[in-house]
Image (tube, grey):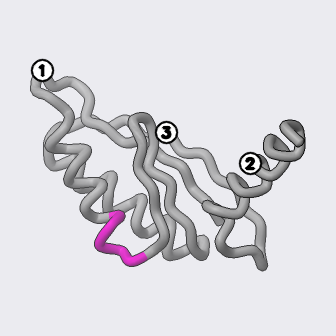
Amino acid sequence: MLVAFSVSPLGTSESVADAVAAAVRIVRESGLPNRTDSMFTTIEGEWDEVMEVVKRATEAVGAYSGRVSLVLKADIRPGHTGEMEGKVQRVEQRLAADQG
């Protein structure tokens, strides 16, 4: 499964960068394939392992504030791996074919 999620503290006047960095650190230390961009962190793996990482990342952000916002989108496709790259490659192939 792929899970794209965004987690941030609410109700604080401080920058959220430290809290978000704490969450991303947990994702990266998980050893699961992941990618972080300006809006979301995407992680790939089995249901239980991915959700455990999301939970731990959310708890890390909670240390910065008593209230946390979590946005999550999941692509659940049993039996498929490497889809963080595969989905993008398939789109790029279509775009390249349009150019040819």
Label 3 crowd bin: few (<14), some (14–19), many (20+), radius 10 Å:
few
Could you tell me residue 80's position as x and y percent? 75, 74
Could you tell me residue 5's position as x and y percent? 48, 47
Q: Is residue 29 left or right of residue 96?
A: left
Vertical order, 19 against 90 (above or below)? above
Task: State the residue position of label 1.
Answer: 13
Could you tell me residue 10's position as x and y percent? 26, 28
- Secondary element at image label 1: loop
Mark sitting earlier along the chain (1/2): 1
Residue nearest the observer in this picture, 88 or 70: 88
Residue at position x 56%, y 67% from top?
44
Task: State the residue position of label 2.
Answer: 92
Residue at position x 14%, y 43% from top?
18
Quarter of the image with the N terminus in it: bottom right
Residue type at mark 2? Glu
Which portion, as a residue range, is magenta?
27-31
Could you tell me residue 35's position as x and y percent? 45, 56
> What whole-number distance in Å separates the C-alpha atoms at marks 1 and 2?
41 Å
Q: Nearer the viewer, mark 1 or mark 2?
A: 2
Residue type at mark 3? Val
Q: Main secondary structure of the magenta part?
A: helix
